[in-house]
Amino acid sequence: MDGWAGRFAPSPTGPLHVGSLISAVASRADARARDGRWLLRIDDIDPPREASGARESIPRTLERHAMPADGPIRYQSARLDRYHEALGALAADGLLYRCRCTRRMLVGHERYPGTCRGERADPDDVESLRPSAVPWARPGDALRLRLSGRLCVDDAVQGAMDVDLASGPGDIVVRRRDGLIAYPLASAVDDAEVAHVVRGADLLAATAAQQAVLERLGLDVPGWAHVPVAIEADGRKLGKSTDAPPVDEGRPLETLLAVWRFLGQPTLTVGSSDDFWRVAPDAWSLGAVPHLRAQAVPEGVV
């Protein structure tokens, strides 16, 4: 871990929307309140889903809201070798197996039924699946991580959760059939390098699996805090899947203040986005964030 740091890690599948900005504001305020650094990581390991121009628009939108990252942007696509080292370590411990199941074969199953559990993957198998220079163009078997036992996810907003891994996430994919590294592995490896992860509660369900990956790799587990996600009047999460509009870059202060209220924070009297960030860290209280998984979209921002 490179000093005390928090991070914001959007996926470049589209421009930044208010739902993502809520997580960004919460994570930045929390990091600055602890005199830590706020890092920006672009989770760009799923090229087929990446939207044109999103890599450039995300940091631009953050900067329009006076939210530059504290250091160079980190890209997951530049860390594929590190993820494969992690796969090799898990395979060496006998925790991975090859899986040939398709999505169609798994219809009707809440979690993976263990169909391929006998197909153990050893380090040589993992090395044979290492991607070429075009990492998404080499299909093969998926790799799954065996998960059993219990763990406690201690979340600063949502509270402590005791999770049975077998009946919860079950055996998770850590390398997809299309050759791409799966989110739980990549994010776990990267998040071991920060002290605190503040993100949306829509990712709470993935946290147990991510923490299990960290524990099996012997890596540091960060502190977790999952803030409420914004939902529309019909109950749908505000996000790229619901065609949420991008953040309006022309009224950054109004948007910041609306997000601040959404997060349950005290009223701030400021005249600009820069002023907002000068006072927000001292006023920030993680304990004041509503202990909810979701709540209505901040009024006036979409």
Image (cartoon, rainbow, N blue to C red):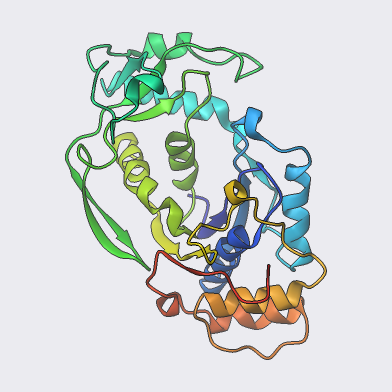
Residue 78 seen in render: no
Give the x, y percent position of residue 74. 64, 43
Vertical order, 112 against 233 (above or below): above
Q: Position of residue 250 (x, y in %)?
A: 82, 69
Instruction: Please say if 24 is above or below 296.
Output: above
Viewer can see residue 298: yes
Q: How many marks?
A: 0
Quarter of the image where the C terminus is located: bottom right
User: For the point 59% across and 77% down, which residue is it?
Assistant: 260
Front-most of residues 276 and 204: 204
In the image: residue 275, left or right of residue 8: right
Please indicate whether residue 118 sits to the left or right of residue 79 in the image.
left
Q: Position of residue 166 (x, y in %)?
A: 20, 37
In the image, taking residue 23 as reference, residue 14 lies left or right, namely right
Residue shown at 62% from the left, 49% from the top: 240
Residue that sits furthest to the left in the current view: 149
40 or 289, which lies in front? 289
Residue 261 position (above or below residue 49): below
